[in-house]
């Protein structure tokens, strides 16, 4: 296993020094899934959820989360994000919503954590908006799908499991 970049020689946590790294275009895509009862999904489809625009609220929350990741994850650098989008695909089988975030930056460090945080917070917001109808919802399969840029180059995850 390679040395962890956030641990120094004494085993103490540290923020990585990126000052000597080249500023490059970087992009990350993350995804997740919130599973719910078909009746709950129908509330989203028809726009009849009691709290209002479920998808709109989750989209804004995800974008805001991407921009504030450094405030939530202790050793993340604050980044001047150049793009953050959150997309939603409603699924009948299994019933739920597939959430995808894409985040871009031109900088000295990647945006993987920003994309993962965006998906996580978007899913949590969906849960919050719909919990009155379905407290048994589950948030699953949050993962990095792809990242480009930087010294480590491109990463692409294997296809997601069947049914999600």
Image (cartoon, grey):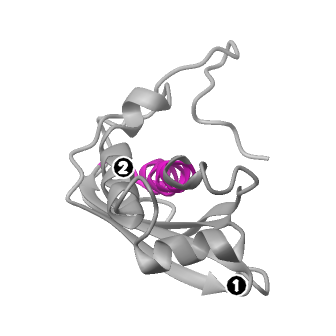
Question: Residue at point 21% right, 46% down?
Answer: 80
| Residue 61's disc number | 2
Quarter location, residue 101: bottom left
Q: 63 or 126, which lies in front? A: 126
Local SS, label 2: helix
Residue 5 location, x and y as percent?
58, 35
Which SS type dominates the magenta stretch? helix
Front one among 24 and 92: 92
| Residue at horizontal 62 percent and vertical 56 percent from the top | 133
Q: Residue 89 vs residue 107: left or right?
A: right
> Mark 1 or mark 2, which has the lower sequence index?
2
Q: Few, some or many C-alpha atoms within 10 Å of disc 2 (few <14, some 14-19, many ≥20)?
A: many
Task: Mark yes or no: residue 157 visible.
Answer: no
Quadrant location of residue 161?
Answer: bottom right
Q: Is residue 121 magenta?
A: yes
Q: Who's the residue at 60% across and 49% down the image?
A: 131
**136 horizontally vs 22: left or right:** right
Q: Which residue is mark 1?
A: 159
Q: Nearer the viewer, mark 1 or mark 2?
A: 2
Q: Which residues are magenta?
A: 108-127
Is residue 117 found inside the magenta-colored segment of the image? yes
Q: Tell me if I can see residue 65 in this picture.
A: yes
Residue 105 placement (x, y as % from top left):
26, 57
């Amino acid at each position: 296993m390679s040395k962890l970049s956030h641990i120094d020689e004494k085993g103490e946590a540290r923020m990585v020094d990126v000052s000597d790294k080249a500023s490059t275009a970087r992009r990350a895509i993350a995804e997740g899934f919130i599973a719910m009862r078909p009746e709950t999904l129908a509330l989203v489809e028809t726009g009849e959820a009691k709290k209002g625009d479920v998808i709109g609220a989750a989209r804004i929350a995800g974008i805001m989360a991407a921009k504030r990741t450094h405030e939530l994850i202790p050793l993340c650098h604050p980044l001047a994000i150049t793009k953050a989008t959150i997309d939603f695909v409603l699924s009948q089988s299994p019933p739920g919503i597939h959430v995808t975030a894409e985040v871009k930056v031109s900088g000295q460090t990647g945006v993987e954590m920003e994309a993962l945080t965006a998906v996580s917070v978007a899913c949590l917001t969906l849960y919050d908006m719909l919990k009155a109808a379905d407290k048994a919802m589950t948030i699953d399969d949050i993962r990095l799908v792809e990242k480009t840029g930087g010294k480590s180059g491109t990463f692409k995850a294997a296809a997601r499991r069947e049914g999600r």
